[in-house]
Amino acid sequence: MRLPDHPGLRSLLGDPSGAVIGLDFDGTLSPIVPDPDAARIHPEAPEVLADLAPLVNAVVIITGRPPATALALGAAPDGRSLADVPGLVILGHYGMERWENGRITAPPPPPGLDAVRAELPAITAPYAGVHIEDKGRAVAVHTRRCPDPAAALAALTEPVTALAARTGLIVEPGRFVLELRAPGMDKGQALTAFLAERRARSVLFAGDDLGDLAAFRAVAEAGIPGVRVCSGSAEVAKLAAEADIVVDGPDGVVGLLRAIVAALRPDR
Ligand SMILES: O=P(O)(O)OC[C@H]1O[C@H](O[C@H]2O[C@H](CO)[C@@H](O)[C@H](O)[C@H]2O)[C@H](O)[C@@H](O)[C@@H]1O
């Protein structure tokens, strides 16, 4: 892949030791599949991230998944894994949980979740194919496997939002999913804090879904050169409209990262 000409990318390539590379997981590093449990990282992603990480300030994955799940789904068939990427940080649950050096730090789960677990089955029962994903500190309602995923999502939005309000949670909408989770953190806040922690001098963030818009805004407001990359799909138009670079799904993201590695290591 030929690298696009973008000022933020030029800054990043000119001063890689100051660059933070932020990446979403599902839809960006991992192709979208009907069953969330069956998702797996793009087979070439662990290798390219392992090549990239020593060349930049930091590689950080910011995801709605728990870090432990991203790690479990982050093993490629060749045996390479996200866990082997040097210095990798995973900010899971939209930044609430942090994995680094093999250790997870996390606050206690929100108290409203038990009521959500009790009430959700009755709310979703009329919609065949709904899948409830319990993520420990959040619960996601998936409609991708419903006969009409968009109609089921639309019909469930009001009762799920009301349930969130009753239980002190918020609704995070995504690709055929409504997630009930604790308020007070999003990918933008998580990325902003990480950039400050690393004293970043440039930032690239790649994402595919509505939850990544907050990270895009953080890039735009960071006060350092930045690049917003959309892992493009037919399902989410909003993100492409706010991106500096649009690539073709996880294949395109891996291609872009590989091109960055090649530009930083022209000898190889
Ligand atoms: O922040 P992300 O890493 O993008 O995580 C967001 C949600 O991703 C997962 O759901 C999405 O991917 C599934 C597997 O490909 C797909 O079946 C589903 O339709 C997508 O919405 C995950 O299951 C959620 O928990 C994450 O919050």
Image: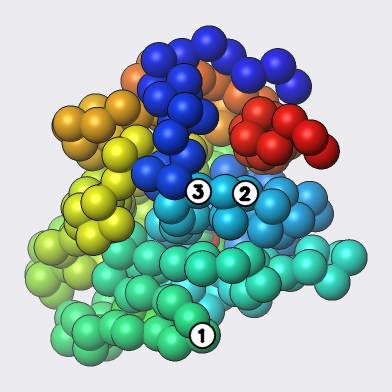
Seen at 35% across and 20% down, the residue is 242
The reply, left or right, for residue 117 in relation to residue 51 is left
Q: Residue furthest right?
A: 78
Residue type at mark 1: give it: Gly
Q: Is residue 142 above or below residue 147?
A: below
In this view, the residue in front, 61 or 17, is 17
**Ligand 1 contact, mark 3 (Cβ < 8 Å):** no
Residue 234 visible in the shown view: no
- In the image, which disc is placed on residue 102? 1
Q: Which residue is mark 3?
A: 56
Look at the numbered disc 3 and give the secondary structure of its residue.
Answer: loop
The quadrant where residue 128 appears: bottom right
Q: Residue furthest top?
A: 5
Proximity of marks 1 and 3: CB atoms separated by less than 8 Å:
no
Q: Which residue is mark 2?
A: 52
In this view, the residue in front, 1 or 93, is 1
Sequence-first disc among 1 and 3: 3
Q: Is residue 117 above or below residue 220?
A: below
The quadrant where residue 155 appears: top left
Residue type at mark 3: give it: Val
Judge the density around disc 3: few (<14), some (14-19), many (≥20) Cα neighbours within 10 Å.
some
> How far apart are labels 2 and 3 at the CA level?
7 Å
The reply, left or right, for residue 149 in relation to residue 97 is right
Q: In which quadrant will I find the N terminus?
A: top right
Proximity of marks 2 and 3: CB atoms separated by less than 8 Å:
yes
Q: Residue furthest front?
A: 267
Q: Position of residue 123 (x, y in %)?
A: 35, 66
**Ligand 1 contact, mark 1 (Cβ < 8 Å):** no
Look at the numbered disc 1 and give the secondary structure of its residue.
Answer: loop
